Image: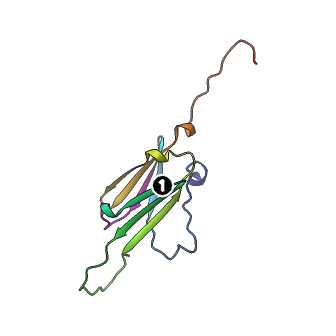
């Protein structure tokens, strides 16, 4: 699988977190970077917190509680704090992650580290091998 071999983060869910609401995401690979898009509708940009510690990227956001004095009839959209953790691999440049939030979608750009990018190796001719 591309995510576990070359795009090094683990997106597996454990039984302990299966009952909690999660943040849906899409991950794609573009030239020289990973593009991660997380759905956070109804979340204010100020409530989004991103943190990288070692090889874990944590996305935390809060959707405000429902209006007081209103009796809900149907409540399918969870409120409160949402957390999503991505296990990053060593081939990503975590010092240069960028984030942008528009229309309820948080977009993260995770550049691939220079050392992990494909490169050509020149083959010399003639002479003697040492």
Q: Is residue 33 a member of the stretch shown in magenta?
A: no
The figure's colour scheme reads rainbow
Q: Residue 111 versus residue 49: which sits nearer the camera?
A: 49
Q: Residue at x 41, y 52 (%)?
A: 108
Q: Is residue 38 magenta?
A: yes
Comparing 53 with 4, the one in front is 53
Is 16 left, or right, of 25 in this rendering? right
Splitting the image into 4 quarters, where does residue 101 fall?
bottom left
**Going 50% across and 44% down the picture, which residue do you hit?**
93
- Quarter of the picture containing the N terminus is bottom right
**In the image, residue 25 lies at what x, y percent?**
44, 60
Q: Compared with residue 124, is residue 32 higher up or lower down, i.e. above or below?
A: below
Quadrant where the C terminus is found in the figure: top right
Picture residue at 75% right of the left edge, 14% below the top: 128
* Rendered position, 120 above or below 4: above
Q: Is residue 80 above or below residue 30?
A: below
- Judge the density around disc 1: few (<14), some (14-19), many (≥20) Cα neighbours within 10 Å: some
Q: Residue at x 72, y 12 (%)?
A: 127
The image shows residue 39 at horizontal and vertical percentages of 38, 63
User: Which range is magenta?
Assistant: 35-45
Q: Which residue is mark 1?
A: 52
Callout count: 1
Q: Position of residue 33 (x, y in %)?
A: 47, 44
Give the quadrant of residue 47: bottom left
């Amino acid at each position: 699988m591309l995510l576990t071999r070359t795009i090094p983060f683990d997106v597996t869910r454990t039984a302990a977190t299966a009952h909690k609401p999660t943040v849906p995401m899409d991950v794609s690979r573009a030239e020289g970077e990973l593009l991660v898009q997380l759905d956070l509708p109804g979340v204010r940009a100020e409530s989004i917190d991103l943190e990288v510690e070692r090889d874990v990227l944590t996305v935390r956001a809060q959707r405000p509680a429902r209006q007081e004095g209103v009796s809900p009839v149907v409540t399918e959209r969870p409120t409160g704090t949402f957390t999503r953790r991505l296990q990053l691999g060593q081939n990503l440049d975590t010092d240069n992650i960028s984030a942008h939030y528009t229309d309820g979608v948080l977009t993260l750009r995770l550049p691939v580290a220079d050392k992990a990018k494909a490169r050509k190796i020149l083959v010399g001719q003639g002479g003697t091998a040492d």
